[in-house]
Amino acid sequence: GLSTAAALSRHPSATGAELRSAVPLPPVYRTPLPLPPVLKPISTAGGVDRYAVTQREASLEILPGVRTPMWTYEGVFPGPTIEARRGRPVTVTHHNELPVPTVVHLHGGHTTAASDGYPTDLVLPEGWHDATHHQHEGHAMGAMHDPRAVVTKLTRDYTFPMIQRPTLLWYHDHRMDFTAPAIWRGLAGLHIIRDDAEEALGLPTGSRELPLVITDRAFDGEGGLSYPSLDPDLRSRPGVREPYLAGVLGDVILVNGAAWPVHEADAARYRLRVLNASNARHYELEAITDDGRRLDLVQIGADQGLLAVPVTHVTLPIAPAERYDLIVDLSGVPVGGRVRLRNRLGSGRTREVMAFHVVRKAPDPSRIPPVLSHDLPTWDRSDAVRVRDFSFRAGRMHGGHGWLIGGLPFDPARTDVTTRLGDVEIWRFIADVHHPVHLHLVGFRVLSRGGEPPGPHDAGLKDTVSLRPGESVEIIIRFDGYRGRFLFHCHNAEHEDMGMMANLEIV
Ligand code: C2O
Ligand code: CU
């Protein structure tokens, strides 16, 4: 296992080699920032918001003048945003017109196991009725020996009670062994939960609240998305290509599906709801004015909703699948001035993310209240009934390289952790290279990082925590809500596909 880690450490980025695009790339900060469309419910009867989503191929103009074939939710990338109200259940019926089976998971969603998008609970496209066909298609591991593991349907209803804290969630593909290429091809969208209490805070709203879905991609000579391989047997091969093993990086940074966009802004406060939906790329964001001043990034929320009090950052690391709710104040920027959101971990054009072009002065009724929320869990060490240790490391799997949790690759037929509903536990992680670790169903708090108190970016309630090379992290969790089988895994999507996932059974 260590030899794999050693091989990876040769890469400058520590997460992998960057794919190079073969089409001419647009200049930075010219394309207007798009906003994902908001999905309309097909019904709101009975206090339930019902949505229908068709997953289909579409040819999209991601780079100006270039057509890129993608896999989409409703023909757009990112997929349409679902706007939910706390306390109003949401049901989403997914219909699959893609050429492959899919699975939908609402990342950060609090729901039953049946609606959680277990990696073998497939939504089959038409023409995949033949079970033998799909079994041969790539479920190499234990799935075939576990009769409960593969549950297929032509359409699937996912139900979300929406009783959790208001926050920015995202839905994305989660099919076993194939999550990374499916997300890369476009299967990701936002799902926002709101409530009256948050709206009463006076935070920037309307056109001054912007979702920012940051992803990197690379393009081939025809404008299609480059990807190392879609070979279903890839991960069992000794000669697996390194970019896939390390995590796939592209040389183009997209925000809401546009390359290095610019947003025409008022000289006012903005609420930026940032998601890193990249497969493997980490960013460290900073907001810089033309004259080199760094604007404060005032964090008001984490993965699972509002912080207790705002936390001010100068730069902000964000790992795959993490979300940060930020306020950036553009009021001191002169009309005609520009603020660039840059990535300190990038080089050349991957240092650039997007820009705000301040085009007018305007009144700003918004505020950042000194206290944001009162309902964060206050579990401490004495509440925990057990402590578990997990290593996240490279290792051998099925005769090739893979990524392991506690020395084991994912097996849907094996229960890795059994816990009881309502129990509070401490989980201790150690990692060889960067691994963003995500737990389904529950939020958690970071207790320590590298033996020290949590860092400034660990505040609040999270569902994904960034493990850095060699660093130990402790989290505290209460397993609330539902019994059943859920997952935890690395959210470097290629690592996830190459074994770094485990089963969590709540009894
Ligand atoms: Cu965002 Cu199990 O995933
Ligand atoms: Cu990982």
Image: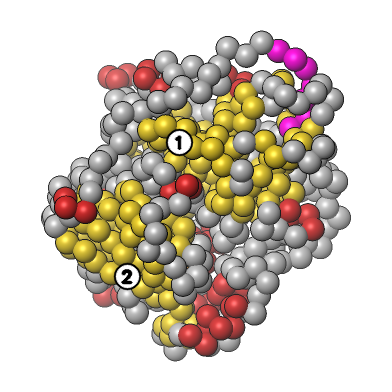
Query: What residue appears at the point 83 percent right and 52 percent down from the top-left corner?
Result: 25
Q: Is residue 319 above or below residue 164?
A: below
Give the percent coordinates (x, y) of residue 128: 43, 59
Q: Secondary structure at mark 2?
A: strand
Identify the amino acid type marked 2: Phe
Residue located beneath label 1 in the image: 301
Dot 2: within a 10 Å radius of its alpha carbon, few (fewer than 14), some, or many (20 or more) residues? some
Dots 2, 1 in contact, CB < 8 A: no
Q: CA distance from mark 2 to mark 1?
A: 27 Å
Residue located beneath label 2 in the image: 390
Between 75 and 421, the residue placed more toward the observer is 421
Q: Left or right: 29 with respect to 195?
A: right
Give the percent coordinates (x, y) of residue 321: 49, 51
Q: Main secondary structure of the magenta part?
A: strand
Total labels drawn:
2
Which corner quadrant holds the C terminus?
bottom left
**The residue stretch that appears in magenta:** 356-362
Identify the amino acid type marked 1: Gly
Query: What residue appears at the point 66 percent right and 10 percent down from the top-left corner?
Result: 363
